[in-house]
Image: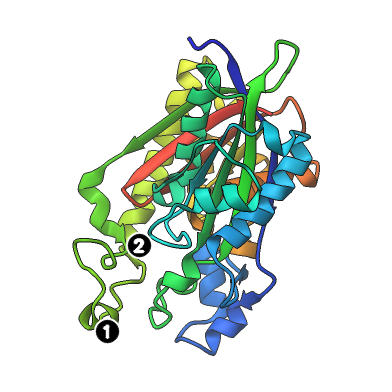
Amino acid sequence: MGLYFAKFSAFGSYAPAKILTNQDLEKMVDTSDEWIRTRTGMVERHIASKEEAASDLAYQAALNAIEASQVRYKEIDLIIVATISGDYPFPSTACIIQHKLGLKNIPAFDISAGCTGFIYACDVARQYIENGIARHILVIGVEIVTKITNWTDRNTCVLFGDASGAAVISRSEPTDISRIIDTKIDADGSQGNFLMQAAGGSRLPASHETVDANQHTVYMEGNRIFKNAIKSMYASSDELLRRNNLSPADLDWVIPHQANLRIIKALADKMKVPMSKVIVNIQKYGNTSSATVPLATDEAIRSKKIRRGDIMLLTSFGAGLTWGSVLARY
């Protein structure tokens, strides 16, 4: 047991202004609005401008989260950013956010766990809070996946959008109803080649050959990912419920990774949770990777679906392969 409990103080989010619709994609690749809706549930997605980088989106989401939390900027003890599409290979996007917020002398680092990044970051932040090392932590999931998308691949280019979601995770006081009940993260590196960006690292440094072969863009084996996503998100969610003596009926809300509407429905069916308890916004944003869960949570809170005291389960799956869940009373 830790010294303290952690809680979600507040969430914030931000998406770029430009919107790319299914009809727009029909003009770009051999696809159709009907095919995209039927296979994915997506209708439109937000696209970053040429000038926008991950830190720009993350900064706006951070401002919204901090404002909603009523935590003062100088009270933030740590910044964790989950991203696979940061501004640069280094320095970290978290350090850039620290500078933009005018903060100094606090740790700031990035986490790379694909679409599960925000869940991983929440798990790490929880440990810092519970052990008494930090009182308030800014956790951000941000992606500009469209800048590493192969726009000639109709199977992947219709899927992704750009956005950021943030949360302020704080120490829960004895009088608080809110707290993070439990977290579970996992990985299976043996299946990492199912979803990856092959070039740009030390294995395949940038070259004319890697650029010509589109190896700096997202590669995904969709069918393998589909099956693994349902199985893995269910496994981590089921374990959290069991070890905390809860059942799916005790949940007020499930906020899953917004990768594919069919995955979301299959997960809800497997968990025996009605879709009326599942937060879905994939139709507006597409798959924004590590930003999907905090973005969907923030929208649900601001629309007054999720209220203080509600028990919510956040769950995701992504490159690595990685997966995990967070069980919390908001």
* Element class at badge 1: helix
> Is residue 4 positioned above or below 260 on the image?
above
Instruction: Examine the image and state in which quarter residue 253 appears.
Output: top right
Q: Can residue 9 be seen?
A: no
Rendered residue at 54%/17% (across/down): 132
> Is residue 303 positioned above or below 30 on the image?
above
Q: Would residue 328 appear left or right of 207 to someone viewing this image?
A: right
Going by the numbered disc 1, the residue's amino acid type is: Asp
Separation of marks 2 and 1 at Cα, in angstroms? 23 Å
Going by the numbered disc 2, the residue's amino acid type is: Gly
Q: Would residue 236 appear left or right of 164 to someone viewing this image?
A: left
Q: Can residue 112 be seen?
A: yes
* Element class at badge 2: helix
Q: x, y percentage for residue 124?
A: 46, 31
Point out which mark residue 212 bears.
1
Rendered residue at 57%/46% (across/down): 140
Q: Which residue is mark 2?
A: 222
Rendered residue at 52%/14% (across/down): 245
| Dot placed on the residue nearer the N-terminal end, 2 or 1 | 1
